[in-house]
Image: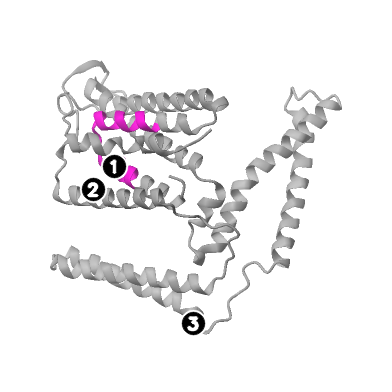
Amino acid sequence: MKTSGVWILWLIFNLLFLLSTRNPVYLLIVLTGLLLSGYRMTRKNQRASWLKNNLRFLLTMVLLSALINALFTHNGRTVLFSFPQHWLLIGGNITLESVVYGTINGLTIGALYLLFTIINLALSVKQLTRLIPRAFHPIAMTVTIALTFFPSIQQRAREIKEAQMIRGNRMKKISDWLPLFIPLLVTSLEKSILLSESMTARGFHIPSRLKNSGLPFLGLLSALFFSFSGWILHLFSYPLLISALLYFVGGALVMATFLLSSQQTRITHFQKEVWHSADILMGIFLSVLILLWILFTINKLLPSLTYSPYPALLSPPFQIIGLLLSAVTFIPLLLSKHD
């Protein structure tokens, strides 16, 4: 798994899975795979701190979610203790079922955070910005500048702080930090002005003079019309085939508009990604998994996904296919090679 396309397919499948289930068995398998994969992908001298920070975040999310759900949701049969009824919002029974449901929500939030953390470890800023279509190349440039802005600000702040401490400023009071902000603001503005002048000199985002420059707007407007028409017909119980056809036409118009806009934008890549045979096979495998997941969801072939501890706490059910799908998070652990 070296190309960004394979990682995005892996991300899409795991997002679909996490947003569709509240089964704690599947969530624990997903979390285990994410933690092990992230630990393996982190540099050896940073693995302990990475694992500690992410476990701390996961525990914090679980505790906060369980506490909030227990205080504001009073459903369930297993009563742990009670608050007086006249207490605003939190008055009532604190049940074991509400604590368990809040814990499950916390596990889901932690898994989503770990998922994007691993994507950040696997893909560089260059790979992430290349995923943005060429029609939105100004957005890609803005995202690149924004991602590199904060590290540069931290570096300059560190240098200015060291210079102030050499001059005898120990940075103990709030007033001692004032000499840090003005040089930091001035240097940031100087860098921004230099960057804007450099981009202008290189002809960044020159307005297009092509004759069909108004076609993208018409294409998006037509796509919105067809999609909205399909939604309206679906609300009034028209045949599903008609709504699906209108949705398809709207999506096709969006894709055609993006392709047309991309052809009008010329971008030079000095180094292109190479899809090896292993990446192609993994991409096909993940695409098939996504299609199977959509079919399973439409036909409701995985009822064990919809687990709820209400009204009485029961052991969560599981299916073999669900266990196998939740283990997709282990793929980076098995295939990725990192120092």
- Local SS, label 2: helix
| 218 with respect to 25 (left or right) | right
Eye-nearest disc, 2 or 3: 2
Q: Horizontal and vertical percent for residue 238?
A: 14, 68
Q: Horizontal and vertical percent for residue 122?
A: 48, 42
Marks 3 and 1, Cα distance to the nearest angstrom? 41 Å
Residue that carries the numbered disc 1 in the rendered image: 17
Q: Horizontal and vertical percent for residue 101?
A: 26, 29
- Tell me if residue 27 comes above or below residue 148 in the rendering: above
Q: Amino acid at mark 1?
A: Phe
Q: Nearer the viewer, residue 141 or 91?
A: 141
Mark 3 and mark 1 in contact? Answer it, CB < 8 Å: no
Q: Residue at 60% x, 50% y: name it.
A: 146
Q: Amino acid at mark 3?
A: Asn
The kind of secondary structure the magenta stretch mainly shows is: helix
Mark 1 and mark 2 in contact? Answer it, CB < 8 Å: yes
Earlier residue among tags 2 and 3: 3
Q: Quadrant of the N terminus?
A: top left
Q: Residue at 25% x, 53% y: name it.
A: 291
Residue that carries the numbered disc 3 in the rendered image: 212
Q: Residue at 39% x, 26% y: name it.
A: 64
Residue that carries the numbered disc 2 in the rendered image: 293
Q: Nearer the viewer, residue 305 or 280?
A: 280
Q: Which residues are magenta?
A: 13-34
Q: Is there any visible trace of residue 306 in the rendered image?
A: no
Per the rendering, the mark at residue 108 is none
**In the orientation shown, which residue stands out farthest toward the bottom?**
211
Q: Nearer the viewer, residue 144 or 1?
A: 1
**In the orientation shown, which residue stands out farthest toward the top?**
81
Q: Is there any visible trace of residue 19 in the rendered image?
A: yes
| 205 with respect to 249 (left or right) | right
